[in-house]
Amino acid sequence: MATSTKKATTNASVGQNEKETKKYDHEEVKVRRVNFSFDKETPRFYYKNNPFSTHFINTLHILFPTGERFFVNATLKHQKAIKDEKLKKQVRNFCGQEGIHSSMHERFWNILKSGGYNFQGYEDHIDFLLHKIVTKIEIEGTKINNIDLVATVCLEHFTALFGHAIFQHIDVTPEAAPEDIAELFQWHAAEEIEHKHVAFDVLNLVDKDAYIKKIALMPIVTAVLYFYLGIGTTILMYQDRKRLELTKLPKQFYEFATGLFTELHGDMVSDFFKFFKRDFHPSDVNDYYLAEEFFKDKAYA
Ligand SMILES: [Fe+2]
Ligand SMILES: [Fe+2]
């Protein structure tokens, strides 16, 4: 746990000094009270003026809230099985972090709705798939159980890798993206790196067949994730069909494919496959320094 060089006190001013000297500890999985608001004048194609890249990011804004509620539910249902106080606290804070991620991305939906986009059907479909189907997959007397938690572990591997890429490869300069959106994704990325081991540790604790389930489900989760990322991007592109210039689309797609999409997968190939090693643990990808570096000068850290 995080340590402080000063003795704990209730005095507010000394508490502030303590905050300044407190060391970053990724195992603390700290819930940070952020409060993002987004510019109502956000350009329609806010990422490098590219509709493909922007709608790929918008699809993430739409997927995160229901996806993260699914992660929380899948993990929390095993709360009673956790005896270790440290893991118990990490689970609580993991749920706290994911809850705030959900609400901040959902806040961006107002910008999308005021832009005339209708994604309710898509969101409802994902919500139904996760909360009404995947959550309920269980066949008594067989090893087909805990599928929601296994899927969470697989998806958390992706969010950690995407988070890594946001700091290492993706262009988040003010020239590329509005600063509020760039910071939202960087804050989210830093916390994904910080809590990447929590659902993994819970699954290992509650399921003796965790390894085989993880490697069996990961290819399916990967295919489903990219399928729905593609569907979401396509739906939003279609709703913009009257605003797009047909002749520019091939170049714009090329820029998306070689730009944002390639950057997102920067270190991914080798780190993705580490997941299939029997002794893999998310902390093996030691990139906590990226989160530490990001939080260094943030008032909400
Ligand atoms: Fe998250
Ligand atoms: Fe997460």
Image: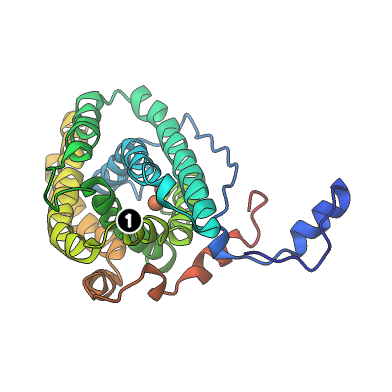
Image position, residue 249 (x, y; %): 15, 46
Report how many numbered discs are placed on residues in the image: 1
Q: Vertically, is 59 above or below 9?
A: above
Q: Residue 241 appears in which quarter of the rendering? A: top left
Image position, residue 263 (x, y; %): 30, 64
Given the image, on which type of amino acid does mark 1 rest? Val
Q: Residue 69 appears in which quarter of the rendering? A: top left
Q: Which quadrant of the rendered structure holds the N terminus? A: bottom right
- Left/right placement of residue 202 relative to residue 86 reads left
**Which residue is depicted at the point 52% across and 48% down?**
93
Q: Is residue 170 visible?
A: no
Q: Vertically, is 251 above or below 135?
A: below
Q: Which is nearer the eye, 120 or 207?
A: 207
Image position, residue 251 (x, y; %): 17, 54
Q: Residue furthest front?
A: 141
- Left/right placement of residue 233 relative to residue 14 reads left
Q: Which is nearer the eye, 135 or 261?
A: 135
Image position, residue 163 (x, y; %): 39, 59
Q: Is residue 158 visible?
A: yes
- Left/right placement of residue 178 relative to residue 109 reads right
Within-10-Å neighbours for mark 1: few <14, some 14–19, many 20+:
some
Q: Secondary structure at mark 1?
A: helix
Give the residue at mark 1.
206
Snapshot colouring = rainbow
Q: Which is nearer the eye, 78 or 239?
A: 78
Q: Which is nearer the eye, 277 or 157?
A: 277
Q: Vertically, is 280 above or below 297?
A: below
- Left/right placement of residue 189 relative to residue 236 reads right
